[in-house]
Each structure stands twice: as C-alpha cells, then as structure tokens.
Image (tube, rainbow, N blue to C red):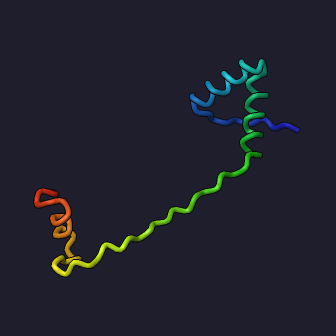
Amino acid sequence: MSIRTTVTLDDDVVERVKQVSRARGASFRQTLNEVIRVGLTAAPTKKRVFKVRGTAMGYRPELNYDKISALLEYAEGPWHK
C-alpha cells in the first residue's frame, strides 16, 4: 500500500537525495523511501549524561562570596568589566 502526500523538503535535502538517486540509478521516490526506512530503523543514539564534578577550592575568609563583582575583581583584576 502506498499513500500520496505532500512533504516540504529543504533544498539541501533535495539535492542530497538527487545525488544519491543518480549514483544508485534509482528514482527520486525510491531513494527517498529507502533513506526514510533506514532512518526510521536506525538505532537511536544514547544521550550522554552531563555531569559536573565539583572541586574543593578552599575557603578564603577575606572574600565576600555574596558579591559577584568583588569575586570577579579578585579573579580577573580591577578591569574585569
């Protein structure tokens, strides 16, 4: 069974499918159907979990940790702005 439908493809996708269909000697329709089948049956890629590892940097009692501008000035100098 086949169904006729309208799909809007980006220009780069159309060109790529045309290239592949010419290389295979197949029609645009056949190539597009094969590419879609492969894409639908491909195994989904695993997403890696992003983890942040903290590092103990020590506590400096002379710094006011509530004032970001003071911390930036300490880290980058008085011309950090």
| Point 18% across, 59% down: residue | 76
Relative horizontal placement of residue 56, taking residue 2 as reference (left or right):
left
Q: Is residue 44 above or below residue 24?
A: below
Q: Residue furthest right?
A: 1
Relative horizontal placement of residue 54, taking residue 23 as reference (left or right):
left
Quarter location, residue 20:
top right
Instruction: Name the foreground residue: 67 vs 30.
Output: 67
Quarter location, residue 73:
bottom left
| Point 74% across, 37% down: residue | 5
| Point 26% across, 79% down: residue | 59
**Residue 43, image x, y percentages:** 73, 49
| Point 41% across, 71% down: residue | 54
Q: Residue furthest bottom?
A: 61
Relative horizontal placement of residue 34, taking residue 44 as reference (left or right):
right
Q: Is residue 43 above or below residue 15?
A: below
**Residue 78, image x, y percentages:** 11, 60
Q: Quadrant of the N terminus?
A: top right
**Residue 56, image x, y percentages:** 35, 74
Q: Is residue 66 above or below residue 48?
A: below
**Residue 42, image x, y percentages:** 73, 46
Q: Quadrant of the C terminus?
A: bottom left
Q: Give the number of marks.
A: 0
